[in-house]
Each structure stands twice: as structure tokens, then as C-alpha cells.
Image (cartoon, rainbow, N blue to C red):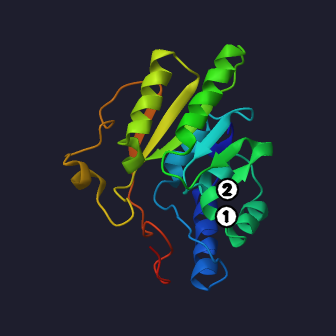
Amino acid sequence: MKGTNLVDPTYLIRFEERVADAFNSGYVGAPVHLYSGNEEVLIRIFNDVEEDDWVMCSWRSHYQCLLKGVPEDQVFSEILAGRSISLCFPKYRVFSSAIVGGVLPIATGIALSIKRANKKNYVHCFVGDMTAESGIAHECIKYSQNYDLPIRFIIEDNGQSVCTDTMSVWGMEESSFKHVSNKKIFYYQYTNSYPHSGAGVRVQF
């Protein structure tokens, strides 16, 4: 949120290391999806996120929750309870879904509601590179653009999609959004040092 430029990236890094240690030690009995290598980008993104804005995420959302203001211990407690891939904190207006594309129509609907109510807040919807190539993503983005809804889609391209490479699946050289110039789309690439799922020690899908 405003002022997140004051957040030290190492704070986010240490949190994911804490989760990774807990997962590899067997304290987390459900899947986790960890971030690394994109801390500074996310901090910059959240400099445009207001307190009343909505943040919609996929199964990888630890950083978004922290940057939206959810207390670290509260986020960690939910992860220990097995809800890492579906973190939802209504008080802070941050929601996640482990369903591929699950938050996209919800985010679009919230943005439509905001516009109809003539409110000033905004929706920030985080999308992975594989999900961004799906039909539901293109439909929601197209609808949001055509009706000028108060939403932006942040497409996070780490080239990971379970056990497949996103571009090879679609027979593409690069993301459909890599060269798009549009105020409703923010596309960035990063390299994640963690595997798609898990923390590199315990076996995960």
C-alpha cells in the first residue's frame, strides 16, 4: 500500500524462508507456493494500492497479504493451518483461490460493482503466466477493458506451471501480454528460486 516503499525486501524474503523451514520440517500439512526474486517489484506495485482497494490472488499470495497489511503472525498461523494456497482476509480486502482462474471473475465482478456505485477504490488482480493464457483470463480482461472497469491485472511470469513450461504448452515464444501497453495490465517476469510447489525438500506435486 502507500508507503510500502519503506518495506525492506529482506522482510518478505525472511518470511518465505520461515514458511519454507516450517514446511520442510513437516509443520505444514498442505501445499505451499513460495515467492522469491520479485520482492522489489511487488513493493513498487503496492505503492499504488490503497487501503480500501481489493487485492485478488492465486495460490501464491504470501507477499500480497503482508504488503496489504495483514500481520505476519496472522498470515503464518493460517499457513500452519493448511490454508497457504487459499489465504483470505476480508478485513484487509485480500482474497486468494487455489482454483486456476478462480479469482478472475470475482475480481471483475467487484470492479463492476465499484463502477456502478461510483466509488473510487480499485481492484488489483494477480495472475500467473499459465492462467493468463486461459480463456477465463482473456474474457475477464477483455470485459474489463471494454467497460473501463477500475481494475488492473498483474501478470506474474515465472515460467512455472506445475511440471510444465507455459510457453511450450501453448507453442508460443513469449507471453501474450509481454508487449501489451495498457493501463489495466501490468506484466513482469521473474525467476523463482523455489519450485512451483513446496520448498525443495519434501516431495510435492
- Assign the N terminus to one quadrant of the image: top right
* 2 vs 92, nearest the viewer: 92
Please determine whether, in this image, residue 119 is positioned above or below residue 63. Answer: above
Q: Which mark is residue 181?
A: none
Q: Which residue is mark 1?
A: 83
Please determine whether, in this image, residue 195 is positioned above or below residue 40. Answer: below
Residue at image coords 57%, 47%: 57
Residue at image coords 67%, 56%: 87
Q: Which quadrant of the structure image shows residue 54?
A: top right
Classify mark 1: residues with Cα within 10 Å, few (<14), some (14-19) or many (20+).
Answer: many
* 8 vs 43, nearest the viewer: 43
- Assign the C terminus to one quadrant of the image: bottom left
Verify CB contact (< 8 Å) between mark 1 and mark 2: yes
Label 1 is placed on what type of residue?
Arg
Considering the numbered disc 1 on the image, is that residue within a helix, a strand or a loop? loop
C-alpha gap between disc 1 and disc 2: 6 Å
| Percent coordinates x, y for residue 108 in the rendering | 57, 30
Please determine whether, in this image, residue 7 is positioned above or below residue 19. Answer: above
**In the image, farthest residue toward the bottom:** 25
Q: Which residue is mark 2?
A: 87
Label 2 is placed on what type of residue?
Leu
Residue at image coords 63%, 40%: 55
Residue at image coords 63%, 63%: 84
